[in-house]
Amino acid sequence: MKPAIAWAKRHLSMLKSIAFVTYKEWAAYRSHMLLSILIGPAFFLAQYFIWNAVFSARAEVGGLDLRSMLLYYGTVTLVYYLTMDFADWNLQMHIRVGTFLTFMLRPLSHRWFALSQKAGHRVLGFLFEFLPVWLILALAFRLPILPVSWPWAILSVGLGFLMVFFLNYSIGIAAFWMTRTDGLRSIFALFRDIMAGSFLPLTLFPLAFQKVLFFLPFQYATYVPAKVLLGSYELGGISMSLPAIVGCQAAAVLCMWLVSEILWRLGVRRYTGVGA
Amino acid sequence: MSAAALGSRAPRGSRVPGLGQLWLRSIRASFARRMAYRADLALDIAVTLLSELVGPAITLLIYGSTAGSGFPGWAMYEVLLIQSVFLMSRGLAFPLFMGLMYGVLDQVRSGRFELTLLRPRAPLLILVCQGIDPIAFTRLAGGVAIFAISLSHLPSPSAMGIAAFVLFFAFSLLVLFSLALFLSGTLFVWVGNGRVYELLDLLLNFAQYPLSIFPRAFGLALSVAVPVAMVSYIPASALLGRLDLTGLVAVPASAVFFLLSLLFWEKMRSKYTGADG
């Protein structure tokens, strides 16, 4: 038991240090991050106009009324600021230019390092993106988005944070096989965003497609955290309580962690360092 | 703005390649660069085509979920026509000149912009040529296909409508070029800000829908202040025979927008201070 506690303590301490350094590093670019105050609400404004026009002719679309639709888009925007990362870009860049070699020599796995970096980056995102955009949505659009159940929402967003990381990291691992992965990463990001519900609530898709989406990991990255935050979950005609869907989300994250572990082991075997 | 000021004319008596030669060499270099990673290129083309279709797919889903009511006053194929014009305009702008944004972003951050300044042509022309990406013409394919499908479901446009469409489509490219100038101009002082692409997407997001879904003042701003309505809504409206006064107002507004963008870019360029080198 003791070695396990010592191992966990050591890793937590490393996570804290790396997150802090990443926070400091990215704080230098906080003006870039602050652009989210403009970009997030402006994208939301476009959705606001689009859906206002659509709902001017009818009261319900895909089981949602206008306010539910706007709440969904607002929540998705906020969830994005808490969970986004570019672990795929980072890993492929290190592999491509050769700097990955230095990570092989460090006393911690690159995955833990990247996850710690994400933690630091998202703390900054919480302060400079999430909080201002939350305020704008609450004050300008009168959409004060608060979780119906705080514990389940925090847990679900945390699992979404991990799911986005494992998904992106697994795609970054493809750089062990391909020198450039820009195309693969873009095509993956497109499908991920569509199937995670970033563009449209998943309940607007045809029912058969919704049923397929239920068994894919993508909904757990955005759709599930957003719906848990809003207090109810439904997809493909399946309604679930918050504990049940968060349980499914935890299982999906575990599966995705296993997938990334397998890909990692296969990929690292192929690695030959250059440059560094 | 004369051709000489834009650097499209080679200095007299020099052995500097002419504009056509420069253009061709840029295309050849870009093609060779992209062909180095063929698998990635194939995926890139696929994703470009697919990502361009997201907007029309959302429109189909909206009209599908609302039993065809969608945007009041607009039939589905009319909205798809607007979006296809948007895709065609982007499909020409990205391979031809939008690479300018990445050029400034990359060169200012790395300090290599000094080399561009040393070249015997206007930096803007050099950056546009360096950013040419012939592979990106594949973006056009999706737009052309949706354009043809939409038109086949709509009444045939008049000759006047077609002529107006061609004119407004040229202005559409001008507005996109102006946006590239404004956004890349900011990168001379806002070094390394990769989020300019999000700003571009943000502005163009409003160009993909009928102007009537926006409040009147906002719609006017999209036609005059930042005339993104010219990118797709106005050319498509001309083709549909639904053009109103905003279309005519947007023409001079787009020309002024272009001149302002050139002045802005030059002003920002003069503020460039080298780093790294």
Image: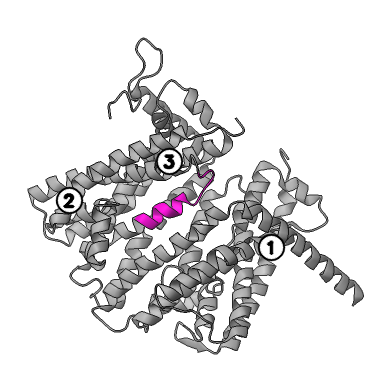
Q: Earlier in the sequence, mark 2 or mark 3?
A: 3
Mark 1 lies on a secondary structure that is helix
Using residue A154 as the reference point, say whether residue B238 is left or right of it.
left
Indicate the amino acid at tag 3.
Answer: Gly
Residue extending furthest toward the right: A2
User: What residue did someone put label 2 on?
Assistant: B249
Using residue A50 as the reference point, say whether residue A95 is left or right of it.
right
> Who is closer to the viewer here, B158 or B4?
B4
Determine the CA span between mark 2 and mark 3: 26 Å
The answer to whether residue A33 is above or below residue A155 is above
The answer to whether residue B188 is above or below residue B243 is above
Using residue B30 as the reference point, say whether residue A20 is left or right of it.
right
The lab-note entry on whether marks 1 and 3 share a chain reads no
**What chain does mark 3 sit on?**
B
User: Image quarter for residue B109?
Assistant: top right
Location of residue A171 in the rendering, given as x and y in whole percent from the top left corner? 60, 58
Residue B131 can be seen, yes or no: no
Looking at the image, which residue is at 17% across and 70% down? B73
**What chain does mark 2 sit on?**
B
Q: Which mark is residue B185?
A: 3
User: What residue did someone put label 1 on?
Assistant: A115
